[in-house]
Image (spheres, helix red, strand yellow):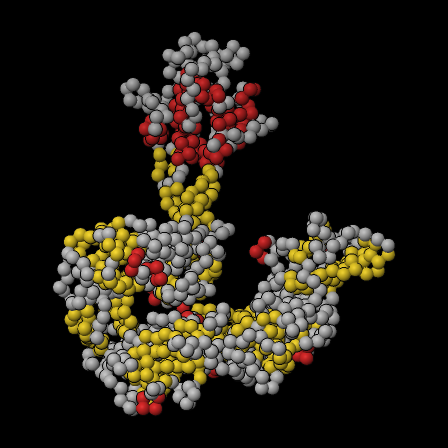
């Protein structure tokens, strides 16, 4: 504290000795100084109320002033001096003991322990007290008239500007002089921060001080938004520690990602986000299918709900297993930032589900809402529900993800519901607890509460109660119908462009809106749509490798491709340039830098996929995008944009193989070689240099410990990816199968280090063996005559004559389909089965060597070690089911069920499985979509039955069209029956009724 006050007091005291002290713009007189200190209890004044500034102060009074000013603790019960009447009755004793204990004052006679509390304070005594209190430096050379004992203290006060050299230092100090000194100390201590302002994106904090001055503090690291942080600074020799919060309302980042159940992910931002981009599921990437994204009312939290609710144990998170979420394209509320971030989180579901709400829906049904998503299979089991102690007699309709509507007869009045055995997606079951609910007669038909439009082709209508059914929905006239999906209280209507809403007010008619009490009515609602005027933007450009080619994925903030809008896949809209701005020619790019191969678009992720031919050279590039339009009714065109990409580090850098050999044996000694192969070419200079001995540690046996390489060991590069370590003429015991290696601070040629998740130091890497082997589960049939294989090393020779495919007892020769490609230290080879030989759609076959000594080898001459084809490696079914004609060349079949319904049949190349209840399978009659179609796999498992009720009876000329949407590739509604669940290829098949009826 004493050091803190020195500079501030020095300046103030120089004035206070002889004049009023100036603080800021206000002159403070000695009387004002006294009044301020009196108000704080530092000075008392005389009984008549005067300050007595011209009088002198006693040593006792001075001890009290110093104690009060410096905040010293008063000490009672201790009496260190022998003065007469110095005891518990002496008012000054606690103050005298306080300054004594602090070493600031001492007695007039130290030997006799006399303090002289009634004695006056001389100027030189005051100088000593101030020098000690302020920790001033006492000089060895003096030039003043003070008494010998005081010369050093007085000189310190003079040097600090506290005293004038002309003073009579032996004279008593006036109260005015002491008041000025005390006021200066108090002002120095009273300095505080009045307010602060954060600027320059959290890098600068400007503090407004109580004396009117401002202090600007530039931070080494910007403040984290909306988080209280301590900021330290010094002003007038006083150290301040202030708690500062950089208040930001618009989000800057993802703050956290959590999941307390296995079907929903909560994404919390550090501020407000834009609703349109935050609720776009395409802006979130997870290794699971996402159905919806819902933004909270405070615009800071988004709940992602996973799709495929009907999969038992299917599309759900793994409990207590880390998973990565990629967020991109999310705009904050003021549009100043687009958030792109990867977050790894661990779902933890340890909470038992419970009944959150039970609501009567008239006397014909009631709704049960659970505290979290529940599994459909258990939720629709009627025996799991008892009303008033009796199992319900009725049906249960599952409303994904967390509720059911139970149709059963109920009496009016109060009821009790008991739910049991309903479980969440982690297997935790609801604890049976009775829930009270009331039932009242419902004679009112559903009414519309709100209606929202999205551009001109989509309307969301919300009712005051759940809707059980409806007849149709149309825009103004019955001819302008839309495709409707029903979910609880909501109907979502999607119109074709031909039936789109007008820019002005529209009347949407909902015919036959029926609730669960059977009340029905036709309702109308007025909707004035808002045109979508938001331009699409490129939210991310990613680079990867695939089958020996670089792949660019351009992700958009919204869909930019449809049957009527192909700008998202138009080659001329994409231009690739190098770091100098020149168009790149070759490697799958034409003379204008446009892609040569067809561009595909994934509507589930809003990504355009550009496949090049081979690899681009390492370096920096830009992808220019222009002319792309969204699917709005009035298309919005993207503002031309250039996105930077870096080629050269598209895969993890790691050790792929490690093995040893010995040579030059002489008795117990020999040379031992260790070979280390990395997934990419290694750095041979700089921080990541792989040729430094210190980068490696070896364990020679399982019982040994990791040891640094001996000083005579050598490290050399034998291929761009392989390092040879030689330990010469050693008798150390080596058990080749037990040897372990640790590498640290080794980089590839782009400067990327291996093992970044553990401080660039690997764990122990065991011997992988010298031979190049197959990567586990890598042999896959991608068509009925094609097999893809991955090897765990970089092969410079792949001889197709070494390999064969075996079906039963027959071997099929293979030929190499193009040149092998390389990725992540592995070799990918594509083989085609020779001749007309074919695999079944669900193949049971093996792949392996047909020769004893294969020619396939890496550039060290290490041959592949693959099982013989007679034993072989099982070929994994990666063949997608496709449609095929019926025996009589009919693309589809049709059965008249005789009850007003029909069943369309589609035949596949293999047995299939299907998840019912989605809109991925569609059916139309002569161009009009039929709603409410059902589909299931036939007893002939290669046939999919699609059952529908047409709006009118079919005629001989009616055209029936069955479609499987392209989203099936990700949602996997229709798949084969293999473990891989290969998604069926999308299709659109049609037939005229008179030609396709199957008896």
Residue 749 seen in the figure: no
Front-most of 515 and 574?
Answer: 515
Between residues 81 and 611, which one lies in front from this camera angle? 611
Query: Of residues 245 and 788, which is closer to you in this image?
Result: 788
Residue lying at 42% horizontally and 72% vertically, measured from the top left: 913
Please indicate whether residue 780 sits to the left or right of residue 245 in the image.
right
User: Residue 678, percent across and down?
Assistant: 66, 64
- Residue 287 placed where, x, y %? 46, 64
Q: Judge left or right: residue 792 versus residue 729.
A: left
Q: Is residue 210 left or right of residue 131?
A: left
Residue 775 is situated, as x and y percent measured from the top left of the image, at 61, 67
The reply, left or right, for residue 926 in relation to residue 239 is left
- The one nearer the camera, 6 or 321, is 321
Identity of the residue drawn at 34% across and 82% down? 904
Q: Position of residue 292 (x, y in %)?
A: 36, 65
Compared to 726, does 581 lie above or below?
Answer: below
Quadrant (top left, top right, bottom left, bottom right) of the C terminus: bottom left
For image coordinates 40% across by 68% down, the residue present is: 282
Quadrant housing residue 276:
bottom left
Residue 866, picture quadrant: bottom right
**Which residue extends farthest top?**
84
Instruction: State whether residue 627 is above or below residue 136.
Output: below
């Amino acid at each position: 504290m004493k050091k803190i006050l020195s500079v501030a007091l020095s300046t103030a005291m120089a004035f206070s000795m002889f004049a009023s002290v100036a603080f800021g713009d206000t002159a403070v007189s000695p009387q004002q100084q006294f009044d301020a200190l009196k108000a704080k209890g530092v000075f008392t004044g005389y009984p008549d109320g005067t300050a007595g500034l011209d009088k002198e102060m006693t040593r006792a009074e001075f001890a009290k002033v110093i104690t009060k000013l410096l905040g010293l603790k008063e000490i009672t019960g201790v009496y260190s001096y022998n003065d007469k009447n110095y005891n518990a009755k002496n008012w000054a004793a606690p103050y005298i003991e306080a300054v004594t204990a602090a070493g600031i004052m001492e007695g007039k006679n130290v030997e006799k322990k006399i303090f002289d509390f009634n004695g006056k304070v001389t100027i030189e005594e005051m100088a000593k007290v101030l020098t000690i209190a302020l920790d001033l430096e006492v000089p060895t050379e003096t030039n003043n008239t003070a008494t010998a004992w005081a010369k050093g203290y007085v000189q310190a006060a003079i040097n600090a500007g506290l005293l004038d050299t002309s003073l009579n230092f032996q004279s008593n100090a006036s109260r005015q002089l002491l008041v000025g000194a005390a006021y200066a100390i108090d002002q120095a201590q009273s300095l505080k921060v009045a307010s602060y302002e954060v600027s320059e994106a959290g890098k600068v904090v400007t503090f407004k001080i109580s004396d009117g001055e401002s202090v600007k503090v530039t931070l080494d690291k910007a403040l984290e938004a909306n988080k209280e942080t301590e900021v330290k600074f010094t002003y007038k020799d006083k150290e301040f520690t202030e708690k500062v919060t950089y208040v930001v309302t618009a989000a800057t980042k993802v703050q956290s990602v959590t999941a307390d159940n296995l079907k929903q992910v909560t994404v919390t931002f550090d501020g407000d986000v834009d609703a349109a981009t935050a609720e776009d599921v395409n802006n979130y990437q997870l290794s699971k299918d996402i159905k919806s994204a819902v933004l909270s009312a405070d615009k800071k939290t988004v709940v992602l709900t996973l799709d495929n609710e009907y999969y038992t144990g299917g599309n759900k998170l793994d409990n207590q297993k880390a998973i990565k979420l990629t967020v991109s394209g999310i705009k904050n509320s003021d549009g100043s930032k687009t958030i792109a971030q990867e977050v790894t989180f661990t779902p933890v579901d340890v909470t038992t589900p419970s009944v959150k709400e039970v609501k009567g829906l008239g006397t014909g049904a009631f709704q049960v809402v659970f505290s979290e998503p529940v599994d459909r299979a258990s939720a629709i089991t009627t025996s799991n529900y008892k009303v008033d102690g009796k199992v319900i007699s009725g049906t249960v309709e599952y409303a994904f993800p967390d509720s059911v509507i139970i149709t059963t007869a109920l009496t009016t009045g109060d009821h009790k519901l008991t739910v049991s055995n309903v479980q969440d997606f982690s297997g935790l079951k609801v604890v049976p607890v009775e829930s009270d609910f009331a039932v009242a007669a419902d004679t009112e038909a559903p009414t519309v509460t709100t209606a929202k439009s999205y551009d001109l082709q989509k309307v969301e209508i919300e009712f005051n109660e759940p809707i059980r059914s409806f007849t149709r929905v149309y825009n103004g006239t019955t001819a302008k119908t839309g495709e409707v999906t029903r979910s609880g209280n909501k109907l979502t209507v999607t119109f074709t462009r031909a039936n789109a809403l007008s820019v002005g007010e529209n009347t949407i008619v909902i015919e036959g809106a029926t609730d669960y009490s059977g009340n029905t009515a036709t309702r109308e609602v007025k909707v004035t749509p808002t045109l979508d005027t938001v331009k699409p933007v490129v939210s991310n450009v990613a680079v990867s490798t695939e089958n020996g080619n670089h792949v660019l994925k351009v992700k958009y903030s919204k869909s930019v491709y449809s049957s009527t809008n192909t700008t998202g896949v138009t080659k001329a809209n994409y231009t690739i340039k190098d770091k100098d701005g020149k168009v790149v020619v070759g490697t799958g790019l034409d003379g204008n830098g446009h892609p040569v191969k067809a561009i595909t678009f994934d509507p589930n992720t809003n990504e355009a996929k550009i496949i090049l031919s081979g690899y681009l050279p390492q370096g920096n590039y830009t992808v220019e995008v222009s002319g792309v339009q969204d699917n709005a009714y009035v298309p919005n065109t993207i503002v031309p944009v250039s996105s930077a990409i870096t080629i050269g580090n598209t895969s993890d850098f790691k050790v792929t193989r490690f093995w040893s050999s010995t040579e030059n044996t002489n008795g117990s000694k020999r040379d031992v070689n260790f070979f280390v192969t990395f997934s990419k070419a290694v750095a041979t200079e700089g921080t990541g240099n792989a040729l430094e001995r210190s980068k490696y540690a070896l364990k020679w046996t399982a019982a040994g410990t990791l040891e640094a390489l001996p000083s005579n060991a050598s490290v050399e590069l034998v291929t761009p990816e392989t390092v040879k370590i030689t330990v010469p003429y050693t008798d150390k015991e080596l058990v080749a199968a037990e040897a372990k290696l640790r590498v640290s601070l080794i980089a590839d040629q782009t400067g990327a280090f291996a093992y970044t998740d553990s401080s660039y130091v690997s764990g122990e890497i065991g011997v992988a063996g010298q031979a190049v082997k197959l990567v586990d589960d890598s042999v896959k049939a991608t068509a009925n005559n094609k097999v893809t294989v991955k090897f765990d090393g970089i092969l410079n020779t792949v001889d197709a004559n070494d390999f064969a495919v075996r079906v039963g007892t027959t071997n099929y020769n293979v030929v190499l389909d193009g040149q092998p490609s390389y990725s992540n230290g592995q070799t990918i080879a594509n083989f085609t089965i020779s001749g007309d030989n074919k695999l079944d759609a669900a193949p049971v076959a093996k792949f392996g060597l047909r020769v004893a000594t294969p020619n396939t080898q890496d550039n060290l001459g290490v041959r592949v070690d693959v099982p013989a084809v007679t034993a072989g490696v099982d070929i994994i079914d990666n063949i997608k089911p496709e449609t095929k004609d019926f025996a009589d060349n009919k693309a589809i079949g049709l059965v008249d069920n005789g009850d007003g319904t029909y069943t369309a049949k589609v035949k596949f190349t293999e047995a299939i499985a299907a998840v019912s209840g989605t809109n991925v399978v569609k059916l139309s009659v002569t161009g009009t979509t039929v709603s409410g179609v059902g589909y299931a796999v036939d007893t002939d498992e290669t046939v999919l039955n699609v059952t529908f009720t047409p709006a009118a009876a079919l005629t001989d000329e009616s055209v029936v069209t069955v479609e499987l949407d392209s989203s099936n590739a990700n949602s996997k509604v229709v798949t084969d029956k293999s473990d891989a669940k290969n998604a069926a290829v999308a299709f659109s098949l049609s037939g005229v009724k008179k030609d396709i009826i199957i008896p």
